[in-house]
Amino acid sequence: MKVRVGNGFDVHKLQNGNNITLCGVKIPNKKELVGHSDADVALHALTDSIFGALSEGDIGIHFPPTDNKWKGANSEIFLKKALSLMAERQYSIQNIDITLICEAPRIKDHALLMKTNIARICDIEITQVSIKGTTSEQLGFTGREEGIAALAAVLIAKDE
């Protein structure tokens, strides 16, 4: 296949804290994400989308949460592994689309920095990255600020 699409989804619980890391960007916030690694839901969803496009399963297969080696790990490590597999197969990213579902922080206030960081990690142009935020209108666990969810889609194409 010359073109492949992948999607990813992740959720992490929130607890009281001082900041939150989304797309590798640390943002002051009254709550923080909880997880085995740094709990960056956006990078986890993006990593899963790349693994999906490559038919390589999900992040848990490559980085099991039961393995203490990944305790507190920077999620950029996970994304770089997916990017490495993609490069080995001679694919490159055409575009990335990430949606963060949360009441806080306001994603639009940080979207440019997030896009810049994703573009840096993936070695692509910022114009190939879309970061969006939405709320769930105070419904469900995201609406009650109990957690944050992220959706990611990626389009990759075979290098010529």
Image (cartoon, grey):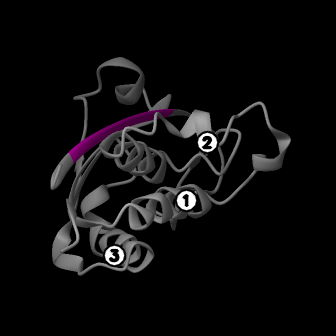
Is mark 1 in CB contact (under 8 Å) with mark 2? yes
Please tell me which residue is depicted at 33% across the width and 75% down the height of the picture. 119
Q: Secondary structure at mark 1?
A: helix
Question: Mark 1 to mark 3: distance in Å?
Answer: 16 Å
Please tell me which residue is depicted at 68% across the width and 47% down the height of the picture. 37
Amino acid type at mark 2: His
Task: State which quadrant residue 106 falls in.
Answer: bottom left
**Mark 1 or mark 2: which comes first in sequence?**
2
Task: Note whether residue 14 is visible.
Answer: no
Residue 70 sits above or below residue 131 on the image: above
Q: Foreground residue, 114 or 124? A: 124
Q: Foreground residue, 128 or 113? A: 128
Q: Is residue 4 left or right of residue 146?
A: left
Question: Mark 3 to mark 2: distance in Å?
Answer: 23 Å
Q: Would you say the magenta stretch is mainly helix, strand or loop?
A: strand
Q: Secondary structure at mark 3?
A: helix
Amino acid type at mark 3: Ala
Amino acid type at mark 1: Lys
First to last magenta residue range: 5-11
Q: Report the residue marked by disc 2.
A: 62
Q: Report the residue marked by disc 3.
A: 119
**Image mark for residue 81:** 1
Asked if residue 17 is among those painted magenta in the image, a careful observer would answer no
**Mark 3 or mark 2: which comes first in sequence?**
2
